[in-house]
Amino acid sequence: MVKTRFAPSPTGKLHVGNVRTALFAYLYAKHTGGKFVLRIEDTDLDRSHSDYIDKLMEDMKWLSLEWDEGPLVGGPEKSYLQSERLDIYKEYAEKLIEDGRAYYCYCTPEEIEAGKKEMEAQGKGPIYNGKCRNLTSAQKRQYEAEGRKPVVRFIAYEEDFSFKDIVKGEVNFPSGMVGDFVILRANGMPVYNYSVVIDDALMGITHVIRADEHLSNTVRQLMIYKALKFKVPEFAHLALVLGPDRQKLSKRHGATSIDEFRKAGYLPEALINYLALLGWSSPDGRELLSKEELISLFDLDRISPSPAIFDIDKLNWVSKHYIINSDSERIYKLALPYIVETGLVATPIDEKKEKFLKAVVEIAKGYCSHLSEIKEHIDYFITDDFEITKEARDVLEKEESKIVLKHFKEALLKEERVVVDSVFTEIAKKIISETNIKGKNFFMPIRAAITGRIHGPEIYYILPVIGKEVAIRRIEKILNS
Ligand code: GLU
């Protein structure tokens, strides 16, 4: 059975890059009927914070990336937080020492530096010189008497290593690139390259899917697998996610953390859909895919080895699709806080107001790529006191516009029916034939007078919601100004 994992270090918020990694691991596990594990790599005590653990789990749940094993849900392991597995790392480190594959090292940072220089002078890499490899018991006692706390160092194999990465293809590490490396720090905390192997092996991970910044780490990990006779998993290293300027995606590029997208009112399923396209494509070229479709189509062989470009316009395009096609009631509920934020509607909202706001959201949502944008599309539904844009003002100043508005006002005054699509078309036809003002010269002034802008929903969607009286009032205001 396939088992994948997402192993974040809780040193910051979940962002586009690492959640894309989580998603690929999740999709592959689900595609194969396997399991997806969440493991928290919180051994860097200075940089890890439990708040980030809570936050990342909350974000993953919001995205519905449920994990089969991990914090909160449990599983066969006693804990899925590395900080609660220290005894396990210690036990394996002791085994490595017993097997002669690791040793206590008492070197100070200065001694390590000097040793590296010495190695470089001999034409070898700047690697640890193995000074503590063969300490006698007396030397060890001496160091301990000096108060030195040892680290545990792994004895690097002096041989070539290679593996076939699912995304990158054949990867070779020539011998001599790596010196004896630390696996346990003096404070008992394991080093990433070591604990990751212990955990992936004990948790039965079959496919390690992760960012390609870890590609060069894999050689140290392969050495640990070999020393402990653990089965080596398959690896799939994912190319970076870059900004449109082809630089590593960062704050400079705008929103990157999942909670920013959530606060901006993106739907989780839209993000999942878009993130899946960052470095993967569906066999039939489709780009709008539900999570179920992604699960059924996703496979590792379609992951691109080149970096993916995060394109906010494309995300917005995907997102718009989900907003338009989602259940109206759900969109209303999600949009309401943004509407309330504008201060245009008093709370609590009674039944009548709710009905009205639902109608507003139903129209305005078509103009939102994320729901916080609804704030820009609702004022003219609710109040006459909206800003008239410069373009709208230019339209309204034209003599022709005044003629259209006069006719339209008269027509509204006489009209007894609700001005839906067909009624509006009837009125429009009549005025166009009377005035010979047509096309945008006819439609623009009406829109500009009623909404204060020249773009937006069809006027016959707006009229039935705001009512004829409001429209007449606004037109009169323009005509009298
Ligand atoms: N904790 C590592 C990180 O967040 C995990 C790397 C891995 O997946 O092996 O980068």
Image: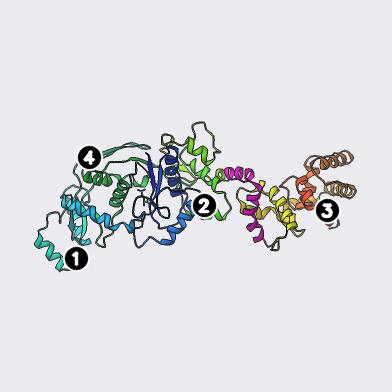
| Label 2, label 3: how far apart the Cα atoms are | 45 Å
Residue 351: in magenta span: no
| Label 3, label 4: how far apart the Cα atoms are | 81 Å
First-in-chain label (1 vs 4): 1
How far from the left and from the top, in percent, is residue 121?
17, 51
How far from the left and from the top, in percent, is residue 218?
30, 45
Label 1 with label 4: CB-CB less than 8 Å: no
User: Range of the magenta residues?
Assistant: 316-343
Residue at 73 percent of width and 53 percent of height: 355
Q: Quadrant of the C terminus?
A: bottom right
Q: Amino acid at mark 4?
A: Asp
Residue 332: in magenta span: yes
> Which label is found at residue 148?
1
Residue 248 in view: no
Q: Amino acid at mark 1?
A: Arg
Q: Amino acid at mark 2?
A: Trp
Secondary structure of the residue carrying numbered label 4: loop
Residue lying furthest front:
76
Residue on which the image places disc 3: 475
Residue at 50 percent of width and 38 percent of height: 294
Secondary structure of the residue carrying numbered label 1: loop
Residue on which the image places disc 2: 62
Q: Nearer the viewer, residue 105 or 25?
A: 25
Q: Is residue 86 left or right of residue 417?
A: left
Residue at 71 percent of width and 56 percent of height: 354
Residue on which the image places disc 4: 160
> Which label is found at residue 291?
none
Secondary structure of the residue carrying numbered label 2: helix
First-in-chain label (1 vs 2): 2
Q: Single out the mark in the foreground, 1 or 4.
A: 1
